[in-house]
Image (cartoon, grey):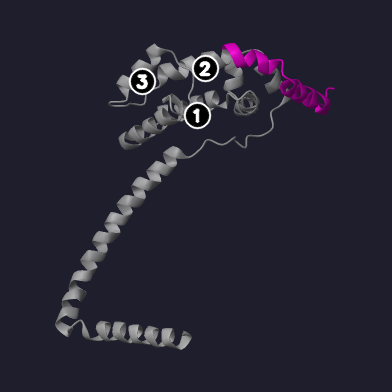
Amino acid sequence: MGSERMEMRKRQMSVQQESAAGGTAPAQQDQAGQANPRGSNACCFCWCCCCSSWATFLHARQPLRLNSSPKPTLEEVHSWGQSFDKLMGCPAGRNCFRQFLRTEFSEENMLFWLACEEFSKETNKSMIEEKARVIYEDYISILSPKEVSLDSRVRETINRNMVEPTSHTFEDAQLQIYTLMQRDSYPRYLNSSAHKNLLNSLSEQSPES
């Protein structure tokens, strides 16, 4: 049985080799030699366009990771208790607050706010449209597991703006989520063991202590 399969395989290979050797005349080979560079360039052009579009999509879909910011100083951590603006204005503060939000299962609020911050700085029209669609699907759509809590007025405004999105499309929504975090999560973070432990740790390491 094995020898029959081997024989059939040899015959198939022989037929393929004969077709490859005798199927193209010299004149046809010359024409193919002239036509191939154009065809190759066209394929390369199409491939580059596809790669560019795919890269744009992947960049827009790239998850925001916790920044590898330097460890906060005792002075910085003390300032976080003075105002929510100071906490959010500090990269280390945003990281610590985001870790706390994760324990409360509300990390999507910070993720949405960060995505809007990045989105507001975008100037490329095609990237604005793509990123707006990604933000909408990830945080605005009622089908998303990371949907943020927005009132109906803001949602209706976003839906209208999505027809032709700009870098200002999510400004109202971003402000609403910022206010929500400031009112609800920020006080709990200041009273959390995570924040108190960080303060105690830095106080012990301080030369003044």
Q: Nearer the viewer, residue 96 or 86?
A: 96
In the displayed orientation, state which residue is furthest to the right. Answer: 209
202 in the magenta segment: yes
One can see residue 152 in this view: yes
Q: Position of residue 39 (x, y in %)?
A: 22, 65
Q: Position of residue 190 (x, y in %)?
A: 69, 16
The residue under label 3 is 158
Query: Magenta span covers which residues?
Result: 183-209
On residue 178, which mark appears? 2
Q: CA distance from mark 3 to mark 2?
A: 17 Å
Labels 3 & 2 near each other (Cβ < 8 A): no
> Image height check: is 85 above or below 119?
above
Q: Earlier in the sequence, mark 1 or mark 2?
A: 1
166 in the magenta segment: no
Task: Specify the quadrant of the image occupied by residue 28.
Answer: bottom left
Q: Secondary structure at mark 3?
A: helix
Q: Quadrant of the C terminus?
A: top right
Residue at (46, 20) in percent of width and height: 174
The residue under label 1 is 145
